[in-house]
Image: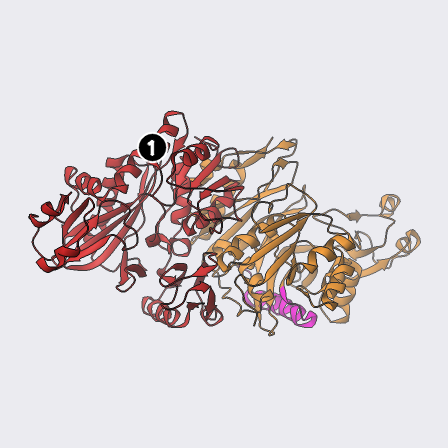
Chain colours: A red, B orange
Amino acid sequence: MKAFYGDLRLGILGGGQLGRMLIQQAINYNVTVKVLDPDREASCRHLCNEFVVGSLSDYETVYNFGKKVDLLTIEIEKVNVDALEQLEKEGVQVYPQSRIIRLIQDKGLQKQFFKENDIPTADFQIISSAEQLRESHIPFPYIQKLRRDGYDGKGVYKVLDEGYLANAFTEPSLVERMIDFEKEIGVIVARNEDGEVKTFPMVEMEFNPEANLVEFLIAPSTLPFEVQMEAENIAKRIAETLNIVGILAVEMFLDKHGKILVNELAPRPHNSGHQTIEGNVVSQFEQHLRAIFNQPLGDTASLSNAIMINILGEAGFEGPAVYQGIEKVLKCDGVYVHLYGKALTKPFRKMGHVTIVDNDREKAIEKARYVQETLKVIA
Amino acid sequence: MKAFYGDLRLGILGGGQLGRMLIQQAINYNVTVKVLDPDREASCRHLCNEFVVGSLSDYETVYNFGKKVDLLTIEIEKVNVDALEQLEKEGVQVYPQSRIIRLIQDKGLQKQFFKENDIPTADFQIISSAEQLRESHIPFPYIQKLRRDGYDGKGVYKVLDEGYLANAFTEPSLVERMIDFEKEIGVIVARNEDGEVKTFPMVEMEFNPEANLVEFLIAPSTLPFEVQMEAENIAKRIAETLNIVGILAVEMFLDKHGKILVNELAPRPHNSGHQTIEGNVVSQFEQHLRAIFNQPLGDTASLSNAIMINILGEAGFEGPAVYQGIEKVLKCDGVYVHLYGKALTKPFRKMGHVTIVDNDREKAIEKARYVQETLKVIA
């Protein structure tokens, strides 16, 4: 069992809000943290033992950074995996493992993994040319996704009929049957080196269609117990099949027929787990630390109803961020504001989140709506 | 109302664990934090925008540090108050106010304040010479306390009979009737600039007699409601009489006759409030930030039973700290470990704390005993 407190140098690839919240938790264990991020104004810049400015996709930069730490983790998947693989060979612990990051970087490989392991997912086809796209066996309407580098709704294109094909992506992609889903749901699962696996309770998500981002999330779910258990079991099965060390966010759809289909994986702390900070016995950040340091996983039980709202930059504003309405929001009990330390706002940029905790679910929803109307990030 | 997020530079005098936990909370609001501490290895050194090494008792050092911030707070009372007074004159906001720090630095003035404002406290007498001590009207056994610089049990001397007088302090001091107390209790109260005042629920403390430190604290209290209300009302009355801005820890005794006597004040986050991080809707650190930034104060309600244990350096060990038993402790649900980032341990040094949260009070106590037996800091 590794020392959890001070002896080991933890490297984090990425210095955004996920790294920032991971550090907030790591402080409790004296973890020595180094962060690599290309942005010298990244959220983590003042909160770690060492902040290195550099590219996450450059082999040499990632390799050299990794050589100076004992344990390396990520807060973003878009990193140089070849460097991670080399570091693993040289004895640096990389959690999640490089092979998992490689798999997840490529939506095509990810879907094939689902298929090979009987993980329920929407019908799909891997596409490598415009011709193949035209000959796809997936019926209209469908969704085309770039295999690589899609993020927060980027790299996704809806092909409603033949007329849309002209503007389709020409890069390697996959096409996927469009699911008429009832609900977007998610489960975060953790696995440590010893093989202990624990899931957080399933959450339900609401998307902002304009921004194509999770905007409103509620936990615990009120969907039937069987649905929740099935979702958690799918997440566990994926974690165990991957033998992942760390946490894994499993995004799923519940379709109109009550069937669960896995959409995407993220092998790191995830937007769909922020409400665990106040809403659960341990948070996703604590759990990720416990998993990668091979500590006993924590209790994931919900303490209350928790709603998470992303604070996005208002449309039409770009520049130094101004936060409106925080004082009003702080007048409500059980409302927790988390800002991400980003100096500049732009439309739909994730500037922070708010968690609303209330034993009364209806009251929680009411407060969440008030927060959404009240708190604005302008410039 | 001041901007709570990023625009203002907050200075903290002292970079120990209280500053560290204050920063953990301040991260959520993008607060720009500068820290002054004489120890270049202080707990906060890597967690702030700027860390300045320098004396807290030197006028020039404190003054120059204060000139570079907009709002100045403390995590230790032993600071140069003349500098703070000058900074206030020059427009820097100092919360708690310099006059309150000055009052609290001197246990004699503090006791006189209690007397003048009908705050119940043990009988006392101010002593400025060995002669006065001999002629004290307080009957044996009594306690002699240095007026200045006592800390965590230092500067306190028990005078059981005449034979003890030879070794008594000769510096300015006060003598105080020894209270045969039933229970040591505490209330943390906050007041913001607008005059809003809120107390946290009363806590009960257990002391380690060898180390003379709070070792075991339990909240909420099970003492009669009237006692709890009286304690909270006393705390409120003190905060309002002082017109303090910030939080104030009020340490009290409940004597064998059910009478509450105020022992000491601390105008800052306090060891007796650490359990609020997990045990209450808002923590003392969040509340202090809200108070000094003149934000609405947060809900102080208890969420569960919470027990706080200090993790002290084991007797007989001095040197680079080694933490034993953390893995075992993390196997228990609802156990939260907070280490303070101190490289070196020494006997009874506060190296961290653990909060145990459980809806079942007896189970919480059982877990707390297990943690106490299991978690050790050696060298």
Residue that appears at 27% across and 55% down: A153
Which quadrant of the figure has residue B73?
bottom right
> Which portion, as a residue range, is magenta?
B221-246
B367 to B187, vertically: above or below: above
**In the rendered view, does A47 fall on the left or right side of A242?**
right
**Closer to us: B375 or B207:** B375
Which is the main secondary structure of the residues drawn in magenta?
helix
Q: Quadrant of the N terminus of chain A?
A: top left
Residue A98 versus residue B24 in the image, above or below: above
Q: Quadrant of the C terminus of chain A?
A: bottom left
Question: What residue occupies the far front of the structure in this picture?
Answer: A166
Few, some or many residues within 10 Å of mark 1 (<14, 14–19, 20+)? some
Residue type pointed to by label 1: Asp
The secondary structure type at the circle numbered 1 is: helix
- Quarter assignment of residue A374: bottom left
Residue A229: percent from left, percent from top? 22, 49
The residue that appears at 27% across and 65% down in the rendered structure is A210
Which x, y percent locates residue A17?
A: 42, 52
The residue where tag 1 is placed is: A82
Q: Is residue B241 visible?
A: yes
